[in-house]
Amino acid sequence: MRSLLLLWVGMAMGSAFAGTVTFSGKTADAIEAVGAWGLEAVAWQPYDATVDTWTKCGFMATGSVWKDKTLFAPDVNIQTAGRWRATFRAAEPAMLYQVMLSVRIHNSSGETQTQGTLRSATFRLATATAEASATVTLTGAGTLEAQQNTVTLVFDTAVTVAAGESITLMCERAEETLGCYFGLTQVAFEDCLVVSGEVAWPEDGSSPMVCFQGGTLTIPAGVTVNGLRVMEDSAGGTLRVFGALHGVDSGEPARTAFPLPAEVTVILEDGAELFMDGRLSARVCVPGAAMLGAASEEGTLTLDAVEFGSEAQPQVMRGCVEVYRCRMFGVAEGAALRRWDCVGQRMRIR
């Protein structure tokens, strides 16, 4: 399965419920979750269990693992003894799509698995109706803090979780190899911006995944959005740009740079910028003076459908822009424009 988790609160307002869960105050029997999700229980189950029963799980109380009170480290050898699971409860309604786990691997002495040591495990994230999983091979390092292991889990489609509903994260062996313990430093939930009403792009520098549900998303003047990401199961809506929408070369000229659904309309207001390499399939409307171009001087921006208003004064600022079904267009000095199907004529301007 793919790997990514998105959360939603209040579709009409387009707000996002997400954040990063960290841990603190560890004892041999308990640990606190700090963040948007509460930690209900931690349990384990032996691999040779004859019935599906789970027992409360304690935390490793030795070595560097014990000294770090922020390390969520169930005292279970995943390779040889059994699996552990942690149950989290949502404080508010959520739309789950992706989650990223920061993982540490250590030995029975509570010390890091050393540099070059490889250990495999399977992580599963389950709601009442769906599950995301990933089997990964992680590597040790000179210290626990030096490890850079990240596991990403993604549901096939977005899954709604009600306030008070639980989700379960489980870790189990992928195959039996040399012993290993698996712990967490954080569980990061990515923002999901659901657009079903009038929604403004956040001005705090965040870059949430976007889910269009018939509403209007506005990029305010002075705000630059780099690399817009859109959920695959988005519906229609409007993206209204007063600021700037930038992208980079996808490496494939025919590939959609921003995977906007065909039902979404992009409106470039006066002073707006659309600079990117690659192809944009969504309909683009330019009622006034907007600036378009490639992300680089050598790049090409391809627009499948463009509509210019009677007062439109669009300018190609750099690189090459390819457009279809347009009526008027301005070209800056040194830029290139290719244009087709203009009142029954075929034109090419460089």
Image (cartoon, grey):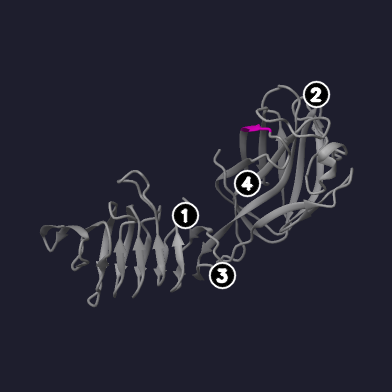
Q: Which residue is mark 3?
A: 13
Q: Which is more foreground, mark 3 or mark 4?
A: 4
Q: Quadrant of residue 271?
A: bottom left
Q: CA distance from mark 2 to mark 3?
A: 49 Å
Q: Quadrant of residue 272?
A: bottom left
Compared to 226, does 313 lie above or below?
Answer: below
Q: Position of residue 240 (x, y in %)?
A: 40, 69
Q: Which is more foreground, mark 4 or mark 2?
A: 4
Q: Which residues are magenta?
A: 136-140
Q: Which residue is mark 4?
A: 100
Disc 2 marks which amino acid? Asp
Q: Is residue 117 magenta?
A: no
Q: Which secondary structure, mark 3?
A: loop
The answer to which of marks 4 and 2 sits earlier in the sequence is: 2
Q: CA distance from mark 1 to mark 2?
A: 44 Å
Residue 47 is tagged as none
Q: Is residue 138 magenta?
A: yes
Disc 4 marks which amino acid? Met
Q: Position of residue 338 (x, y in %)?
A: 18, 56
Q: Which residue is mark 2?
A: 48
The answer to which of marks 1 and 4 sits earlier in the sequence is: 4
Q: Is residue 264 left or right of residue 36?
A: left
Disc 3 marks which amino acid? Met
Q: CA distance from mark 1 to mark 3?
A: 19 Å
Disc 1 marks which amino acid? Arg
Q: Is residue 256 left or right of residue 86?
A: left
For the C terminus, the quadrant is bottom left
Q: Which residue is mark 1?
A: 229
